[in-house]
Image: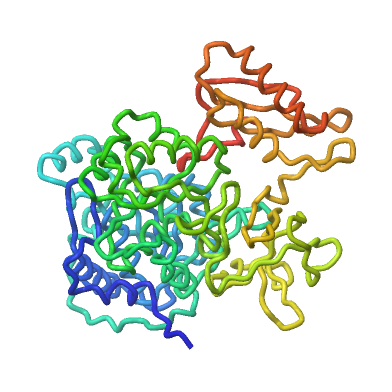
Amino acid sequence: MRETSTLYQAVARYKNSHSVALYFRNKSIRFPEFINRVDKMASILQSLGIEKDTVVTLLAPNVPETIITLYALSKIGAISSILHPLLPSEVLYESIVETKATYFIVLDVLAEKYLDIVKRTNIRTYYISALQDLNPITRIGFHLMYKKELSLIDKHHYLYKMDSDEEVITSDDALKPSLYLRSGGTTGKSKTVVINDEAINFVTRQSKEILCHETTGFSMIGLMPIFHGFGLAMGIHAPLSNNAASALMISYDGSEIVKKIKQNKINVLLTIPYLTDKLLARKDFSGKKLQNLIATYIGADKPEKRLFSEFDNRMKEASSINRLLEGYGLTETATVNFVNTLKENKTGSVGKPLKGVRVKIVNPEVSFEEELRPNQIGEILISSPSLCLGYLNVEEDKQPFYYDRQNIKWLKTGDIGYLDEDGFLFFINRAKDVYKIAGYNIFPADIEKLAGEVEGVKSCAAIYHKDEKHPYFTLYVESDVQDKNDLILKIQDYLKKHLIKYSIPEKIIISKALPRTDIGKIDRKKLI
């Protein structure tokens, strides 16, 4: 039986390593300094009353002290309820009530927005900051830029200004609840997913196999925020638990990404389609420096086919082994469970399952036991050591699991796809995104995939309009073409060749930019 470890234990074993743990702006934090700061933070948090299983709401972007606090809470054995750093105040209130959090740790410059919630809940609140990891000149600008926000908070509650010599007994329970992450749930409604450390570690232990490369001394970009399972597990914990670095970024900065690639401070990119397009649009994202990249993994929105060819051609021109590789996972599976690798990949698929992951495709209306044959479309079921413990405060019969005749636990993903004869998984659509028109199942993802193959289309979103007498789709297209009418005709002609008439969008609207969420996904709610 494999020996388990907590998140803290997985990184603390490198406390004597000379490798860099974190890059942030122009600063490098090596493992000895990183672990010392984590240990000090754990002592401070314990002195404030945080102990094993205390629920702590953590709301901050990817700055060093955020990551340090996360691992300090892991050392204590507390439960980290990680939230979006731009979360609306009322959603914060709902989360505090739902999780029964008794402590709130927030980035200082964001705290002003949540002061009313702090008063309403009387939650014990402390502040982390990027300040101590900025150079002296940047610190001056920081104080001037955020003078108003910083004037409203209690300076005595800054964690980095505190001290403690309390001894912390390291938690070694990797199977207990340790993380609360918000998810749309497999039914589409927002839920809090309960995850243990072993689920995260199961995935990150396979980093070398995923990368097809030794990890020591390498660096992965830490751009995706830690409230996102992919950002937490792969952008932060995967490198740190493999003697590698996470190059932290608060938000997308193409010039900084290119600079760090040139400096050999980023070797692995984690990205989404929108950000990949932005990188490809940069003239300086080219040349010999791209040889420092060994792999790029893309997730979130379904990438258009042309993105792979454009990206890979850029790498070939630079004689780089780096390629754009797609994977698949959910918050409920503690991030990626399927991935294409440099050694084994198939365009259009989301890869093969990681070692230890089982998958089957079923027709849920017939049976969860009976598996469909290769290339038959159905619901994706996953069994993996990385499965979440369940949804918080949700009755057992409404949890997203199915137990088969051998009592094996399967996650009912609610996603539609198929396995081909070689064992590659092809993701088609979220089950909740299937619509019926004239009795036919219509998949918005099919419309978007095909439209994305038309030259001039950068991104698109097919939005369903519910009308009892006349339901229809509108296709919103992001493009910078001059002749919009010509592009509309090309899209219509192409879709008519591949789709039944009920799938053809009634309207096609072209604009230079589509609304985006804070992590770069198309904000579909703003298009409805």
Q: Residue at x 29, y 46 (%)?
A: 291
Q: Could you say which is closer to the camera, residue 227 or residue 332?
A: 332
Residue 169 in picture, x, y percent from top left? 29, 84
Q: In this view, does 504 lie above or below 323?
A: above
Q: Quadrant of residue 493?
A: top right
Figure check: 152 above or below 340? above
Asked if 162 appears above or below 39 in the picture, the reply is: above
Q: Can residue 102 be seen in this view?
A: no
- All told, the count of numbered labels is 0
Name which residue lies at 57% across and 11% down. 483
Q: In which quarter of the image is residue 492?
A: top right
Colouring of the image: rainbow
Q: Which of 221 and 185 is in front in this view?
A: 221
The outermost residue toward the bottom is: 1
- Position of 138 with respect to 99 (left or right) is left
Q: Residue 439 is drawn in which quadrant?
A: top right
Q: Where is residue 467 in the image (x, y as percent from the top left)?
A: 82, 31
Q: Where is residue 258 in the image (x, y as percent from the top left)?
A: 28, 39
- The answer to whether residue 7 is visible is yes
Q: In which quarter of the image is the C terminus?
A: top right
Q: Is residue 255 left or right of residue 165?
A: right
Q: Which residue is drawn at 46% across and 75% down?
A: 198
Residue under the point 32% across and 39% down:
318
In front: 71, or 428? 428
> What x and y, as percent, mark residue 362?
77, 63
